[in-house]
Amino acid sequence: MTTISANLQAVLARISEAARNCGRSPDEIRLLAVSKTWPVSCVLEAVRAGQKAFGENYVQEGVNKVREAAMPNLEWHFIGPLQSNKTRSVAETFQWVHSVDRIKIAERLSQQRPDCLPPLQVCLQVNISKENTKSGMSVEEVAALARQVAHLPRLTLRGLMTIPAPSSGFEQQLLPFRRLRELFEQLNREGLALDTLSMGMSNDIEAAIAEGATLVRVGTAIFGERN
Ligand SMILES: *Cc1c(COP(=O)(O)O)cnc(C)c1O
């Protein structure tokens, strides 16, 4: 077994155990393999080990990798900061975007999504820990943007994403994920049909799953430390 394949199995085992520990089915939680900075050979190794969904942070790197991998059944998620001059490549290349944080970006993605492709699946990125340095909108802004995005014709609003400030200790890690889940539940009570809570990375998937994550984004624990 290669390292990537062994790491993938270990991450899937962590997901299953975390789900069982809180009475959830592991089938409710999808694993996104974050392949940013890693060459396409690593992606293909993960594909051979059964992984299908990959996350990329940088537009040009992601677009190149999608093209090089040239595999029809993979699912590519854009999860990095997105500037308006780069939306077209993203709209033409990826199936999902997790990092929508303003209406201008959402409108451009919708306008630029090619008609021959299904609608782009999007999550709104929420800055739950209120760090000025992290992208994402404030909790107060989410409901209004969600309603606007839900009306854009070429986007399907799927849910919310967050990258909390790093913290250690399970109890501490739960707090931002709990706030995102509460926000998600509130939006659904208000009539939005969201099904995706994109939260949890290598160091905190257990806490994210305990608070309802439906998709965890894992890089380091699969591919190794990035330079
Ligand atoms: C890099 C990155 C990840 C993966 O982080 P790891 O700690 O390597 O698992 C997840 N989500 C986003 C948005 C990232 O940029």
Image (spheres, rainbow, N blue to C red):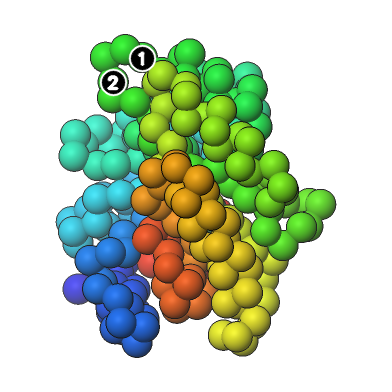
Cα gap from disc 2 to disc 1, whole angstroms: 6 Å
Question: Can the viewer see residue 198?
Answer: no
Please state which amino acid type lies under the numbered disc 1: Pro
Q: Which residue is mark 1?
A: 114
Closer to the camera, 118 or 78?
A: 118
Query: Which mark is on residue 117?
Result: 2
Which quarter of the rendering shows the C terminus?
A: bottom right
Q: Position of residue 209 (x, y in %)?
A: 42, 72
Question: Can the viewer see residue 145?
Answer: yes
Q: Position of residue 189 (x, y in %)?
A: 47, 51
For image coordinates 63% across by 27% down, the residue present is: 103
Q: Position of residue 69 (x, y in %)?
A: 28, 38
For image coordinates 29% across by 42% down, the residue present is: 75
For image coordinates 39% across by 44% down, the residue present is: 193
Please state which amino acid type lies under the numbered disc 2: Leu
- Residue 105, located in which quarter of the rendered image? top right
Give the vertical position of 131 relative to 59 (above or below): below
- Whether disc 1's CB lies below 8 Å from ligand 1 is answered no
Question: Is 14 left, or right, of 34 in this rendering?
Answer: left
For image coordinates 63% across by 43% down, the residue present is: 142
